[in-house]
Image (tube, grey):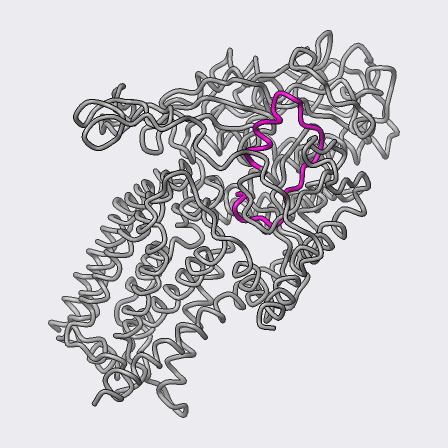
Amino acid sequence: MIVSELILPVLLVTFVLVLGAYLVAVLDEAIAGALGMPRATSVWTAPLTQGAWLLTQQANATEAPDWRAWRLAPALYLALAAIGLAVVPFSPTLIPTDLVTSVVLWGSVEALATVVIFLHGWSANTLLALIGAYRYVALGLSYILISMFVLIGVALPAESLQFSQVVASQEGLWNVIRQPLGLPLFLIVGLGMTFWGPLNLADSRDLAGGTASAVSGPPRLVWNLARAAMLVAFSGAAASAFLGGWLGPWLPGPVWMLLKMLAVLAVLLLIGRLVPRVQPERCVTLMWVVFLPLSFVDLIWAGVEALL
Amino acid sequence: MAVSWLSRLAAQATVPVFPVRGMHGEPVLHRLALAAGIELVDSPRHASILLVAGGVPPDQHDALRRVHDQLPTPFATLWYRSEPLDELAGATRVDDPDALPEALKTIHRELMSGKRGSSPRLLPDEPPNPWEGLGDDGHGGEGMMGGVPYGRPMAMNMTDDIRDGLTLDSLTVTLGPFLPMLPPGLTAEVTLQGDLIQSWTTHSAPYPIALESAFFQALQGPVPIAELERARARYHLKRLHFGLRLAGLERLALEALRLAFEPHPGQNRVMALRRRLVRSGFFRLTTTGRGRLDENQARRVGGIAARAAGLEEDWRSGDEGYRHLNFRPLTQREGDTAARWHQTLAEIEQALQLAGQAERDAVHTRRSDGVETPRGPWGEYRPEDASGVLEELLPGLEWDEAMSTLASLDLAPLSPWSLEETSEAPVPTSVEERRA
C-alpha cells in the first residue's frame, strides 16, 4: 500500500522531473548551438558544470529581504511542478496519482504558480525583481483563463476531469486533430506559466533577470531547476491532453509518453529561441483580444463535436 | 573530496562575467560576446568575474564599489585598460583584447580551485542609511504612514498614476551608471509606479562614444566613401546587436554582430537579417508605437532618430561624391521605436550598397568641412549628449517600452578621439573635464 501509493509515485515523479530538467537544459543548449551561439563545452556537461558552479557560489543577501518567502519561493515552484507532474498518466496503470479531478488540480497549479512567481520577485526587496513580479501578475491572469477553457474542451469528449480518462477518450482520434485550436493555445499557456521565451516577462533581460536578478548560488540553482521542471510537468499535461498520452503502436505506453513530452519540450524551447519577448502591453492585448476569444471558439468547437 | 570534485566541475563551466562598461570599453565586450566559453551576464549576482572594461571616472568610483560588492563570493575582478581601484591595487589588469578571453577563463579556474582568493568587500555590510524606524510597525512614521526607514521615504502614492488611474505606490530610485540596459555612464533618478515610469531626471550623461578614424579623416580631406560607409554600417550593426539582445533575440543579435566584424559584409546578408527580423515578429511584438520623438526632439538627437521622424537631414546630401552615387536620404514617418529600427536597417543596407558602388567607381568624399557621422552631422560642432530628451520621452512608458526606446536611441556625445586612438586616451580625472 505504502509502496504503491506513496514511495513509487514519489520516485517516479522525482526521476522524471530530474531527468526531464536535465534534458531541458541539454536540449536548450543543443538548439542554441544549432542556431549558431558560441559554445565551448559539450551540451551534455554544460548543465552539470553550471549547476556545480552555482553550488559553489555564495547565496547572497539583499537589503532586508523577506527571507522566509525569498528562500521558499523557488522550492514552492519546484513543488508545484512536482504536483503537476504527479497527475500525469504514463500508461493506463502507471499513474503517480490518479485523481478523478486531476485536470482541476492542474488548473490550481497554474494559478498558484502566479502567486509563487510574484512572491519570488516581491520578497527580494529590490527594484528589478519587484517590476518582474508586478508584470508577471498581469500576464498570469490572462493565461489562466485561456487554460481553463482549453482544458474544459478536452474534458468534454472524455466526460471526465481525470487525465487518464482524457487520454483514453483519444483512442480513436487525438485531441490535437479533434480540437485543432487546443494545443497551440495550450502551448501559449505553457510559455506563460514557465515565463519562457516570448512570454518571459518575469525574468527578462530588460530587468537583468527580473525576479531572479538578485538571486545567486544554490537558491538560483533551485529556481532554474524549478523552471525546467515546470516545463517538463507542462509537457506531460500537454501530451496527455492533446497528443494521446501513452497511446501509440509498437512501443510501450510510457515510452510513447516520454517521446511526446520531449516533442512538446522541443517545440517550446525552439519558440523560446526564435521569438522575441513580447512587449507586456502587447502581450496582454493579444491574450485578451485574440487568444481568449479563440479559446471560446475552441470550447464551442469541442462542445459541438461532443454533441454530434 | 566531494568538494574538490564539485569545484573541478564548476571550473569547467562557461565563465559568467558581469561587464562594467567604462569609457570606450564597448569594443572589447563585442568581441567577448562572440567568444566561446564566456557569458556576459546582466546582473552582478550572476557573475563570477567583474570585468571593468575601460576607464571609470573618479566620481563614479563609489558606484563601482557598490557593483563590486554585489558579486557573491567567490569572485574576482579583471581590469581591461582601466586602473584598478586603490583598494584592489593587486587585481589583474589586461590591456590586450586578444588575451582577455583566456585571462577570464584562467581567473575562473583559479577561483574554483582555490588558488585565487575571492576579491575583498570594499564597503561595510550595512544599510546605506541608519535605521530610524518609529511607529507601531517600526516603519518610521505615525500609524501606517510616512517615515524614512533606512533613509528612504516609504513607498506612498504621492502622485496620481499617469496611465490608467490605477494608483500604486511610487518608488524613487537611482539607476546607472553601470545598469546594462542603459547607455554606459548614464545615471538617472527615476520614479516608478508599478512598472510605469512617472518621472525621469538624467543626472549624468552617457560616456562619449568613439567612432572609427575614417570619420575623423573625412574632416581633414577626401576619404574613400566605401571606407566611410562600411564603418557606418559596422557602427549601426553593433547598435542593432544591443537592441536585439535586449528583445530576447540572442541568435539574430549575434548574427548582426558577426556581420559587424566582417571586413566586407554583404548587403544581401543584411537584407536576409531584416527578413528574419520581420518573420520573428520583432517589429510587431516588441514595439507598441511608443517612444515617438516630435520634430524638435528628433532634431536634438539627430542622425537616424531625426530621419526616422521624417526629417531629411543628412550631411551627405551636400557632398559631390555622394551625389555622384545618387545618394538620397532615407526617411520614415512615425518617429517611434519601430521606425528607428526600420531606419537603422535601411541605413545599414544603404551604407553597404553605397560602399559597393563607391568601391567600383573609386569615389571619394569632396567636402571636408563636415561629415555625417552615425550619430548625426558633425559640422561646426561635434554631436553632443542628447540624453536630456529622455525626461520628456520616458514618463508614461512601461519599463519594457522605456528600455526598448532607450536601445533604439543613440544619445551619447561623440568622443574627440577615434576608436583607434582611445586605447591610449587618458581617463578624464574630474567631472568638469568629462562634461567639457
Say if B217 sits above or below B42 in the image.
above
> Can you give x and y, in whole percent of width and height, for residue B327 in the image?
72, 23
Q: Which residues are magenta?
A: B42-67
Q: Is residue B57 magenta?
A: yes
Q: Residue furthest bottom?
A: A250
Q: Is residue B326 magenta?
A: no
Give the quadrant of residue B352: top right
Give the quadrant of residue B30: top right
Say if B224 sits above or below A136 in the image.
above
Q: Nearer the viewer, residue B11 or A136?
A: B11
Q: Nearer the viewer, residue B343 or A285?
A: A285
The image shows a total of numbered marks equal to 0
Say if B82 sits above or below A115 in the image.
above
> Can you give x and y, in whole percent of width and height, for residue A3 in the image?
27, 88
Residue beneath the point at 70% across and 53% down: B116
Residue beneath the point at 27% across and 24% down: B161
Residue beneath the point at 51% across and 65% down: A25
> Can you give x and y, in whole percent of width and height, for residue B211 in the image?
74, 26
> Can you give x and y, in whole percent of width and height, for residue B186 in the image?
56, 24
Which quadrant, please, contains the N terminus of chain B?
A: bottom right
Residue B43 located left or right of residue A174 = right
Give the quadrant of residue A302: bottom left
Q: Nearer the viewer, residue B89 or B277?
A: B89
Which quadrant, please, contains the C terminus of chain B?
A: top right
Residue beneath the point at 47% across and 56% down: A272
Q: Residue furthest top?
A: B380
Residue A90 located left or right of residue B225 = left
